[in-house]
Image: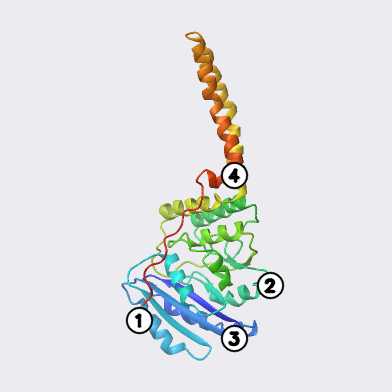
Amino acid sequence: MSKLSVVIPAWNEEEAIGRVVERVLSVAGALQQAGIPELEVLVVDDGSVDGTARAVRQSAIRHSQPGRRVRLLQHRSNRGYGAALQTGFKAASGDLLAFLDADCTYPPEHLPELCSALTPGTALVLGDRLRSPASHMPALRWLGNRFYAALVSLLTGKPTVDCCSGMRVMPASTWRSLGPLPDGLDFTPAMTMRALLAGLNVAQVVIPYHERVGRSKLRLLRDGVRFLDTILREGRAGPRVRLLATLGLLAALPALSLAALAAALQAATRSPWAVWGVGALASVPWLLAGWSAMAGPGRLGLRPRPQAAEQEQAT
């Protein structure tokens, strides 16, 4: 028998969290029809200073019943979106894990559809916001997510996916196999990159996306740069990055060599030994290119940075 644990990270979301919990619980019947008889909702209060925890407790009192349980986990301070998710995953008792945001942007009503797409051999199902005609994502964020999706596809050689989607379903074993993930908002692109580079089967279900309730925590420039850095860092372990880096370096070699040749000809008017010296310098880029192609990213120190292990326990 399958059990679905839905993790909802929440940081100062008192205005919306109660509605999100109720909407998640409302799909229990549809989940049972999909072969998932038990539903668990874990809200991780990530150091909120408003009434988020109170709203969750009230929802738990009103709506919890056998087979539909609401649990509240709390961080003593704000540790980040990814940290909250991983706290929830560690405490979850289901063999299936799902997560979505606490601000009413993602539709819990599509959870049964995502679970149905988790067929044998599928390791991760994403809610695809980018292809939905009912998506109300702001234009700038839509363009940014399109760019990240294209970049992930380029680096992994896989079809384009909504790599930053915050609504997903997966077996608990998938999360464990991907290792510690970032504590911040870049948790989702890191998870996508690792899953694709590991050769896991990633499926998608088109979902609508709505404007959030309350004030957004996303900072377009800061978090956009963080997403880009994470995608590139995770991608360094992939063979396509090694190929693209080598091709880029090889494309620059002719220009470097011509510049070195011009310098050698100019230096020859002063000293014949200068020709040999500049020629030796000109050979360095070619030697580096050959060595990088043979050594690979690991020898060049291009390994993903390890994430700090979680220290604080949920209360």
For this view, does 90 lie left or right of residue 158?
A: left
Type of the residue with mark 4? Arg
Kindly state the secondary structure of the residue where label 1 is placed.
Answer: helix
Q: Which residue is mark 2?
A: 120
Q: Which residue is mark 4?
A: 242
Q: Is residue 16 visible?
A: no
CA separation, marks 3 and 2?
A: 18 Å
- Outermost residue, right direction? 120
Kindly state the secondary structure of the residue where label 3 is placed.
Answer: loop
Type of the residue with mark 3? Pro
Q: Is residue 191 visible?
A: yes
- Outermost residue, left direction? 49
The nearer-to-camera label among 3 and 2 is 2
Residue 192 higher or lower than 89, as above or below: above
CA separation, marks 3 and 1?
A: 28 Å
Kindly state the secondary structure of the residue where label 4 is placed.
Answer: helix
Q: Position of residue 246 (x, y in %)?
A: 60, 39
Type of the residue with mark 1? Arg
Kindly state the secondary structure of the residue where label 2 is placed.
Answer: loop
Q: Position of residue 269 (x, y in %)?
A: 50, 8
CA separation, marks 4 and 1?
A: 50 Å
Q: Which residue is mark 1?
A: 54
Type of the residue with mark 2? Pro
